[in-house]
Every structure is written in structure tokens, then in C-alpha cells.
Image: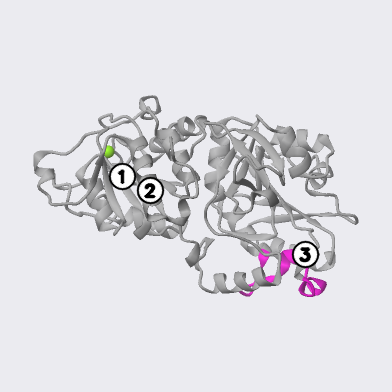
């Protein structure tokens, strides 16, 4: 695993939150009894970040006290960078050019909002796509008020304008960047003030966009602050803040014969071959608001034919091929259990498909709404998994093994489509008919 540090931009004055921010620095306003910063530290700890730089300005003494507390309890160690005069988002990086020392990557985060972003999935995508920078994007209802990115068909940012009069898309800068250490030093050397106005336009053509459609709230006004309290009170805590009303729909994909070519007991990364159009379909589904998760039975592990680390190498190759095409998965779940019978519609173990266990776990980890989600695969066990997890429906793709005559008599309901690109188009069509909110994105071709 690569070493990642973080720069947390937390010195904003919180003017709109006055009078609360007269007494408490904005990054420490209590939400559900915890300082806002705690939620970010949870997210960082969860993706293996153990060192972060935090800038301070107003009420710096209080933030210093907090830093001491955090450094006593761990696991993230905070380093203060005091700014007697605010330096701007890029200015904080310019003032700390040596911070990337000892790291492979640096996350740069605007901490004045509450969200449950899966930083690990974003970092994985960043590590695999090979461009120097990744910018987190969300679909903005008011693009003229945001920094707007334009992406090409490989998810590369080919245009970026801060608060454009004529927005070219609704994909907005969500204030989380991942950069490699060399790029961090390059940005520091630019000596600029602001990321949105100065740095991002200069990085066009060298960065990819990563969509986030989960919970997001700018805790900038008294109304938003009140909402944050309510949301967190109804949250389900699973490592990251998963807010009940922020639950997302997902598309769960079987791996072999669905995402990648069917190979009997695939055992080498060299055998991984993404099926045509899969990366683009996943990118479009994620832009349309769906989390995309791979769900795979791996009895080859239980049989001793491959090890867990062999599987990690195989999945790394799948991530690499997806990232090269600008796509990534929100999660990959596998089950090593060996089946006892040939009947693929019988649940032998809760995690092994057709058992719903892997989907239930993904739903808890990632804040997914199973009732709004689809299960996609090439076998009857995949179809049955969608039913057993009480998904919105199951989709059988014809790009893999297919069904036996016996499977067809199993009496299961499913939609049959040729392949994953057809699935993306079909889901988009379903949602357009139903007028669902999370499909503000374009999955059209
Ligand atoms: Mg399969």
C-alpha cells in the first residue's frame, strides 16, 4: 500500500456561521457531539492516512488544544501550520513545500463540509490511472456558483472554470484532491493563492475526475448546521459517516463473464481482460449516481488453488485496466467458500452467492440502498443473489456462461441483456421513465 499524507484546509473564518464561530473555530463546531474535524479524521484513518497538516488562523489556541488531544489518541497525527494572515488554499501548500517528504501521495481536503466520501476508492483510482492528480467531483444543482470541470471519454479533465457564466457541465469541484508527491512539490513551487482559480486551470489535461454522489453538506450557514445535527442524529456509523437519508443506489456486478472475460479458475493477473465497453459503462453509471461494486465467488481460494494475495494481484490488474479508461469501483467483495452441491440457487453460506451476505456488507460499508440497487451477472446464482438481497431487480448478461435449461426453470425473475454497456443504457432508461433523482447524470450514448 502506498504512503499517503493529507493537507486539511481548515482555517476558514466561518463568517456565515456567526455568532457560533465567534467562540468556536469552524473546523471544531460540534455536530452530534463531536467536532466537525473528527469526521474527517475518521475518513482519513479509514484509508490509512496517519499524518496530516492542518492550517490554523482564527481561534488558533483552541485548534492547538484539539491537535494535542488528537495526537494523544491517534491514529492520525496532526501537524499545525499557522497562518497569521490567510494564505489561500494553494498558499497553504506553497508554505509547506516539504510536507510531501516520505509520502507517495498527498490528499488535499477542504474540511468545512460534512460528507461520507469513500477516500479509499478515490485513492485507489488515483494510484491506478497514472495521471498526476485526481479531483473529486459532485453534480452541482447550481454550476454557476461552483468550479466546473469538463471530462473527456476517459474521465480526464479537459476544461476547468471557476464560477463559469456559461457552464459546460454540472460536474463541480468537491474540494478533495489527490496528487502524487512530485505534483505536490510542483504545485507548492507555483506559489499560487487558490486551487480553483489558479492551480486547477493549470492542471487541465493532467488530472482525472472521480465522482462522489453520496452524502455531502456544506456546513456553512446556520440552516445547514442545523441540518447536519439532524442528519448525524439519524446516521448509521460504520467507520465512515453514513447518513440514512444519503443512502445511494448501487449496481452490483459479478466479476467473471460480466466485467472481465470468463476464464476457468482465473489465477494470473495476465489473464484479466476487461470486456468491451465495461469501463465506460461503469464510469457512466457512477456519474449517474450509482455506486458500482464487484461481488465475486472465489472458491479457488477455498480449494487452495490461489491465495488471498494472488486474488489481490488479480484485482489490482482489474483496477488498473478500469482506471486507464477513467473508471473505478466503489468496492470489491469476494467469498472464498467452496460449494458442497452443484445447485447454484441454494444458499450454502450467507456470503457465497446466491447468499446475500456480500451485498449486505457492501450496503453497510458504503451506505447503499439495496431496494434501489441492481444485481448483474451471467449465472443463475447472480440472479438469485439479487432476489435474496431484496434488490430492485436482477439482470442476466449474455457475455459469460449463461443459463442451463434447468436454470431457466428455476422460476426466477430477471431482465436479460447482452452485456454491461447494455445494462447501463437499460438502467438509465428505467430511471428516466421513473424520473428518479439520482440519474441527473448522462448515461446516454
Ligand atoms: Mg460470472
Q: Residue at x 31, y 49 (%)?
A: 375
Location of mark 3 (residue): 14
Q: Quadrant of the image for the C terminus?
A: top left
Location of mark 2 (residue): 251
Residue 294 appears in the picture as rendered: no
- Residue 318, image x, y percentages: 43, 33
- Residue 73, image x, y percentages: 66, 64
Q: Is mark 2 within 8 Å of ligand 1?
A: no
Direction from residue 282 to residue 117 in the image, left or right: right
- Residue 22 shown in magenta: yes
Q: Residue at x 21, y 34 (%)?
A: 401
Q: Which residues are magenta?
A: 18-36
Q: Residues within 10 Å of mark 3 (few under 14, many from 20)?
A: many
Above or below residue 430? Residue 223 is: below
Above or below residue 1? Residue 153 is: above
Direction from residue 144 to residue 237 in the image, left or right: left
Direction from residue 136 to residue 255 in the image, left or right: left
Amino acid at each position: 500500500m502506498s504512503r499517503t499524507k493529507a493537507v486539511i484546509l481548515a482555517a476558514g473564518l466561518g463568517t456565515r456561521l456567526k455568532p457560533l464561530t465567534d467562540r468556536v473555530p469552524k473546523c471544531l463546531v460540534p455536530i452530534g457531539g463531536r467536532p466537525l474535524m473528527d469526521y474527517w479524521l475518521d475518513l482519513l484513518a479509514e484509508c490509512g492516512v496517519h499524518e496530516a497538516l492542518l492550517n490554523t488562523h482564527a481561534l488558533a489556541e483552541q485548534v492547538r488544544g484539539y491537535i494535542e488531544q488528537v495526537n494523544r489518541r491517534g491514529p492520525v497525527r496532526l501537524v499545525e501550520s499557522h497562518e497569521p494572515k490567510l494564505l489561500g488554499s494553494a498558499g497553504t501548500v506553497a508554505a509547506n513545500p516539504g510536507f510531501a517528504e516520505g509520502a507517495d501521495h498527498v490528499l488535499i481536503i477542504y474540511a468545512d463540509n460534512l460528507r461520507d466520501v469513500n477516500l479509499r476508492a478515490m485513492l485507489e483510482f488515483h494510484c491506478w490511472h497514472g495521471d498526476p492528480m485526481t479531483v473529486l467531483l459532485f453534480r452541482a444543482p447550481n454550476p454557476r456558483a461552483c468550479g466546473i470541470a469538463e471530462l473527456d471519454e476517459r474521465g480526464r479533465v479537459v476544461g476547468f472554470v471557476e464560477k463559469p457564466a456559461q457552464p459546460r457541465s454540472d460536474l463541480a469541484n468537491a474540494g478533495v484532491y489527490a496528487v502524487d508527491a512530485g505534483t505536490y512539490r510542483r504545485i507548492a513551487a507555483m506559489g499560487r493563492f487558490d486551487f480553483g482559480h489558479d492551480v486547477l486551470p493549470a492542471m487541465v489535461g493532467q488530472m482525472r475526475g472521480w465522482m462522489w454522489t453520496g452524502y455531502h453538506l456544506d456546513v456553512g450557514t446556520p440552516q445547514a448546521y442545523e441540518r447536519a445535527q439532524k442528519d448525524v442524529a439519524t446516521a448509521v456509523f460504520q467507520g465512515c459517516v453514513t447518513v440514512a437519508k444519503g443512502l445511494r443506489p448501487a449496481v452490483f456486478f459479478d466479476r467473471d463473464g460480466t466485467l472481465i472475460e470468463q476464464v476457468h479458475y482465473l489465477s494470473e493477473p495476465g489473464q484479466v481482460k476487461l470486456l468491451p465497453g465495461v469501463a465506460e459503462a461503469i464510469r457512466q453509471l457512477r456519474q449517474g449516481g450509482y455506486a458500482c461494486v464487484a461481488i465475486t465467488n472465489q472458491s479457488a481460494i477455498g480449494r487452495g488453488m490461489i491465495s488471498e494475495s494472488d486474488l489481490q494481484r488479480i484485482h489490482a490488474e482489474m483496477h488498473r485496466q478500469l482506471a486507464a479508461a477513467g473508471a473505478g469501483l466503489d468496492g470489491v467483495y469476494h467469498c472464498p467458500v467452496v460449494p458442497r452441491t452443484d445447485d447454484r440457487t441454494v444458499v450454502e453460506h450467507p456470503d457465497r452467492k446466491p447468499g446475500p451476505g456480500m451485498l449486505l456488507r457492501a450496503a453497510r460499508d458504503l451506505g447503499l440502498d439495496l431496494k434501489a440497487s441492481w444485481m448483474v451477472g451471467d449465472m443463475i446464482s447472480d440472479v438469485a443473489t439479487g432476489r435474496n438481497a431484496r434488490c430492485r431487480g436482477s439482470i442476466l448478461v449474455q457475455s459469460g456462461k449463461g443459463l442451463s435449461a434447468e436454470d431457466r426453470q428455476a422460476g426466477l425473475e430477471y431482465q436479460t441483456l447482452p452485456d454491461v454497456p447494455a445494462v447501463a443504457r437499460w438502467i438509465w432508461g428505467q430511471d428516466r421513465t421513473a424520473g428518479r433523482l439520482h440519474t441527473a447524470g448522462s448515461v446516454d450514448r
